[in-house]
Structures are given as structure tokens and as C-alpha cells.
Amino acid sequence: VTLGENQVMIQFLKNLKENNMEILQFVWDPTSEGISIFGKFTIYYYSLMWMLAFILGFYIMQIIYKKEGLSMQKLDSLFVDTIDGIGIFVHNTTIALPMFIPGFGVVWGLFSAYSTGFAYSAIAATNAEVAQLNPLAVLLTPFGLMEVGAYSIAMSRSTLLAKDVIRKNWNQI
């Protein structure tokens, strides 16, 4: 980046600030107003973007499958598998595997717990029924119980392995 390019960028940013461009005033708030349908039913913009992402992704995959000459039935089963229990299992496995890394596993587990809580609070902010539930009630579902068990085992193994590495207990490893 040359000095001239820097000056152009600075001038551009000053113009944005002075003109108060509309794009900079978009409210990135999941609780912002949505599109009201039939008075009581509201589609929020974030929900609309999620739906659009799935629909657009499915459409793009259809184009790829047609070009590759693959069966559309395989695409349908792939789409369903990404949403059902197998998709949940694969997702949880990819989160749990780094928890076995000595020392880092505990940090990863705490980050995973924090991000799960953050996602739950975002959902609760947009859905009044979910907001009334105790967040810890999610842990009482079958998936929640499996996650807590698997993550606990992974993080405890990480801690024990890190302890053995630090103490140089090579015969325990």
C-alpha cells in the first residue's frame, strides 16, 4: 500500500463518516424487528438468513451434483444426514476430539461450554418460549447427557495426560 493509496482510503473513510452512509447504520441485533405475518407470527432477519443459507446451499449442491452426474437421492440423504442425529454426532465428535489434547483440552472444553451458552442466549433472545426455560435443562435431554459425559471424559483424560507429561511419568502415558 503506497502513500497515495493510504490517502485515498483515509478520504473514503472520512466521506463515509461525514455522509453517515446507510450501510453503516444496519442494526446487527438478533432481537431487532422482523417481518410480521398475520399479526402474531414474526420472521426475524437472522432466522431468514439461516433459512436462506440452507436453501442456497442445497441449490448450489444440486448444481454440483448435476454437473458431476450424481444421483439426487444421494443429495437428499446428505441434506437430511447433516440435520439429524448423525450430523449431531459428527459435530459433537469434532468438538470432543480436541479435548483429548493434553492441557489444551480443558481450554477447548471451556470455550465449547462458553460458545454453547452464547448460542443458547442468542436463541433465547429471539424466542420467548426458550427464554422461559432454565438453560441447564438442555443438559437433561439425551443429547445433553451424552455431551456432558463425553466432554467430561475427554477433558479429564486431557488433564491427566498433561499431568503425566509434566511429571515425566512416561510409563503411565
Image (spheres, helix red, strand yellow):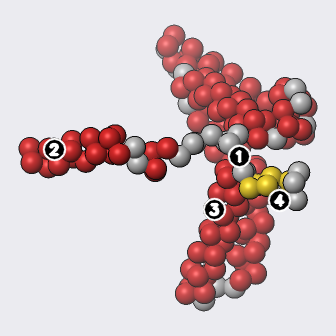
Kind of residue at disc 4:
Ile
Cα separation between marks 1 and 4: 12 Å
Cα separation between marks 3 and 2: 36 Å
For the residues labelled 1 and 4, say whether their Cβ atoms are less than 8 Å apart: no
Label 4 secondary element: strand
Please report the residue visible at 67 percent of the width from the left and 32 percent of the height from the top.
118
Q: Which residue is mark 4?
A: 37
From the image, state whether disc 2 or disc 4 is nearer to you: 4
Depth check: 144 or 55 in front? 55
Cα separation between marks 2 and 1: 38 Å
Q: Say above or below: 90 vs 137.
A: below
Sequence-wise, which precedes: disc 3 or disc 2? 2
Q: Which residue is mark 1?
A: 33
Measured as percent of width and height from the top left, residue 53 is found at 63, 62
Q: Any mark on residue 105, and which?
A: none
Q: Any mark on residue 6, and which?
A: 2
Q: Which residue is mark 3?
A: 53
Label 2 secondary element: helix
Please report the residue visible at 68 percent of the width from the left and 42 percent of the height from the top.
32
Kind of residue at disc 1:
Glu
Q: Is residue 92 visible?
A: yes
